Image: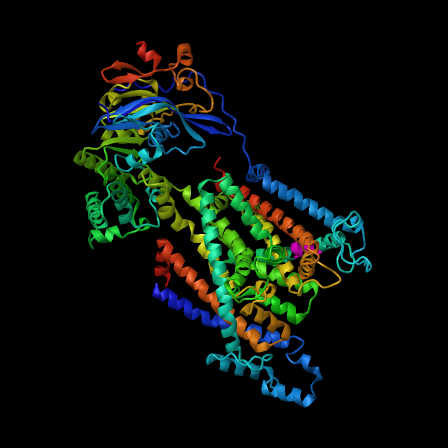
Amino acid sequence: MPLLDVDNLRTWFYTRNGVVRAVDGVSFHVEPAETLGIVGESGSGKSVANLSCLGLVPSPPGKIVSGSAMFDGLDLIKAPLPVLRSIRGKRISMIFQDPMTALNPYMTVGKQVMEPLLVHDGMNRADATDRAAQMLESVGLQDAAGPEARMRAYPHQLSGGMRQRVMIAMALVTNPQLLIADEPTTALDVTVQAQILELIKQMQQRLGTAVILITHNLGVIAGTCDRVVVMYAGRFLESAPTRDLFYSPRHPYTRALMDSMPSARMPGEDLYTIPGLPPELTSEIAGCPFAPRCAHANEICRRRPAMLQEVARCHTTACTRVQAGEL
Amino acid sequence: MTRFIVKRLIEIVPVLFIIVTLVFFMIRLAPGGPFDAEKSAPPEVLENLEAYYHLDLPLHRQYLMYLGQLVHGDLGPSFKNSNFSVNELIALGFPVSLELGLYALAIALVIGLASGISASLKPNSARDYVPMSLAMAGICIPNFVLGPLLVLVFALWLGWLPASGWDGPLHKILPALTLGAAYAAYVARLTRGSMLEILSQDFIRTARAKGLSEARVVLRHALRGGIQPVVSFLGPAAAGLLSGSFVIETIFQIPGLGRFFVQAAFNRDYTMILGTVLFYASLILVFNLAVDVIEAFLDPRIREEHRNHA
Amino acid sequence: MPDALQNGEILAQEEPARAEKGTSLWKDAFHRLAKNRLAVGGGIFLAFMVALALATPWLAPYAYDAQDLDLGAAPPSATHWAGTDTLGRDLFTRILYGGRISLMVGFAATGVSLLVGVLYGAIAGYVGGRTDSILMRIVDILYALPFTIFVVILMVFFGRNMMLLFLAIGAVQWLTMARIVRGQVLSLKRADFIDAAVVLGYSRRRIILRHIIPNVLGPVIVYTTLTIPNVMLLEAFLSFLGLGVQAPMSSWGVLIKEGADVMEEYPWLLLFPSLALSATLFALNFLGDGLRDALDPRAAKD
């Protein structure tokens, strides 16, 4: 029984330049305690898809046009705001990309970590303070002067990596069932990236939280996720268990992505880039969104809408040619 | 933090010194003197008057004598109102101006903050346009227009409130409203602008993602940052408010410090002018310091800066 | 092993390069301003008032000092659109002439503060170092002074001529302009794109003309537009106290004072000049606000 089951989600933005179909028919699910990776370029819609589930998409100009997101028998898309609020921060938590701007500069780190406990669990201040201090320690924030000192620090006094740890502590302090991590390491130094990913994995194992990890970095996916979904122009193009995706990608786009990794090239070879640009999301795309840039595209690809179909065990792809066995 | 405050307090002295010197020489060097009006008096009386006030001494001697008195906190006798010293006059006028200013400040803060915050929550709606247009009116209608207009409507046509004076609570309403209106307008616009900016920042999205109620997000997370420009604005503004607006006190015949000052200026009452200027200047400087301290209190990043530079 | 695409085998069709129309900051700002109806309205109204002021000698139905003592103060009528004052002078004419004075003082005094402020701020910012510290210290001290008081003292003691009025009012406003300009110049000096321009070998002249000045211009324009109403307010305030423009010339401030004195019996003498002043201030403020919103690149969130 999936923890979160999203079906046919469409989130469109009504702007002056037209309707931007940021998420255009996306379905996925997350099982309890599993780590799902959503990988895609900037602008592929991966953040918006997840923000939609929590109702955090700015409402003009964004609008969830269709779809459902079932969480424990409740459709998040149709849920009234007070219900959503009771779920946010308590049963589904989200951490964001830039810890520099995502934390409140005017409040101490301790108060921010404590807040979900006060608001959702109705704890008294003393207990919440203790629990928050414990949490900060578990995410690796040490201070020679003791945990109280860390609690009283302000975000600007901490480094990027430390701030992200605070975000994680804040997200996990209420022991949520699902953690959505939106590009948690993109803004960090490479060395710190590994530490943060390790931390997320540890916390997940300890608390049994399911994790949706959103990133554009294939390397990150390889190290942490159980299953991966590849997103492009607001749609999913392929989904598979991580190993299977890397060893036998079943979509030209996925293959092209892997080819773009510098490590796929020998020293001295030219680097590969996918020619062309992602499509304008303001016009309706007939057929496969990747077709204009795909070396294998044919007339059917350009005309028939691409739907996910299973082509191997637990491995689905939206490429019509792969589905037909031609690739 | 205390080092910062002490440093600022010490810096006030040279500034005041410059002000005293500037104003002292400026007014003495101008044509006309305090006793021009008494032309009808016989010359010996005039001479005695001048001697009594040391006006017959060379200018730099007068200056030094004045400084000497200042150090003792003595602002000298009022040239015009010979029964009073400047200190006494200030002590009489300031509390009145202070009271007027406090009411106006309260009006400005309550109306300004409330409408500004409310407007920022639903931008480009009626809740935004109506109060902001009223605020614009508050800024564009000068208080010396608003005052008489209010008197016209409420005192002369409707007869609900008295047109002038300062005796009972009813007398205080119109002047406080007139004085507070422009400030309320500024506060409202400032608050709306900065709240809008804060509400678009990332950490507000984080707060909402934590499932906090909108009230909590606005009041506990956004407000602290949003209120900053208002605090900065209020510093010099409060000094002006509390020392009484000349115009308001003139229109409503309020015996406050502002009115005394204007009269002193017209009467060439040197000591009174100097005394009031010094008083105002000190107020402004102290208020600026208070505002800086409050700003540091509100924003921990500024606190850090002060600690590093003090 | 992942199935790699060969380098040579390119593409099906290259999608034709999407031509993105480039816009400059100014064109962008102009478009945004044009969409702001309040600002546009303000601008039009302002232009109208300025036109009226310029055309006054030909437009005014009466001479501004033509008295009609038999008539005395009369309410608005067909012959006197805004009524007359206690000496029988046509109020509409006086408002027109008053507008000339008020607007002139507004623009002139703002010009003074603009000149002084920009030069001062640019020098402080550009030269930097000790000169900057000293110059800004002076500004800080002056900032602490109760300026309105100074102006009052100046006007009371040194007489009431127009030159002094311009200077005095301009002197009050230049401080903030200096601060703004200095701030901009400072941040520009440090800006990466200036370093880039230098590294690209651009001449100093080119850098100053095409990179520094356009970036300083924005806040300066906005602040100037917002200074004019403040100046006009200050002038009106001084006139109200009897310190500004002197009879027989009149500015809107003087007219308002005269109206306030007799408002009980002749309310139109207060209402019409107040309306004229307030409407002009509205227009200026809306325009200034619109300019501020339009020129702030961060506001390009659509």
Relative to A120, does residue C134 appear above or below in the rendering?
below
Viewed as shown, does residue A80 lie left or right of C244? left
The quadrant in which the N terminus of chain C is found is top left
Q: Position of residue A81 (x, y in %)?
A: 35, 34
Counting from the top left corner in percent of width and height, residue C280 is at 65, 49
Establish if C96 lies above or below C13: below
Coordinates of residue B44 in the picture (x, y in percent): 67, 90
Which of the pair B95/B122 is nearer the observer?
Answer: B95
The quarter holding residue B171 reads bottom right
Q: Residue furthest bottom?
A: B44
Residue placed furthest toward the front = B159
Q: Is residue C104 magenta?
A: yes
- Asked if A108 appears above or below C69 in the picture, the reply is above
Query: Can residue C134 be seen from the camera position used here?
Result: no
Q: Please state if C178 lies on the left or on the right of B290 as rendered.
A: right
Q: As displayed, is residue A172 above or below residue A66?
A: below
C300 left or right of C278 in image: left
Q: Nearer the viewer, residue A277 or B97?
A: B97
- At 42% from the left and 63% from the top, the residue drawn is B290
How is the structure coloured here? rainbow
* x then y, percent, for residue C184: 51, 51
Q: Residue at x 49, y 24 (%)?
A: C17
- Taking the magenta stretch, the answer to whether it contains residue C294 is no
Tell me where residue C152 sits by quadrant: bottom right
Q: How many numbered marks, from 0 up?
A: 0
Q: Main secondary structure of the magenta part?
A: helix
Answer whether residue A115 is visible to the viewer in this image. Answer: yes
Q: Which residues are magenta?
A: C101-108
> Viewer-proximal residue, B269 or B54?
B269
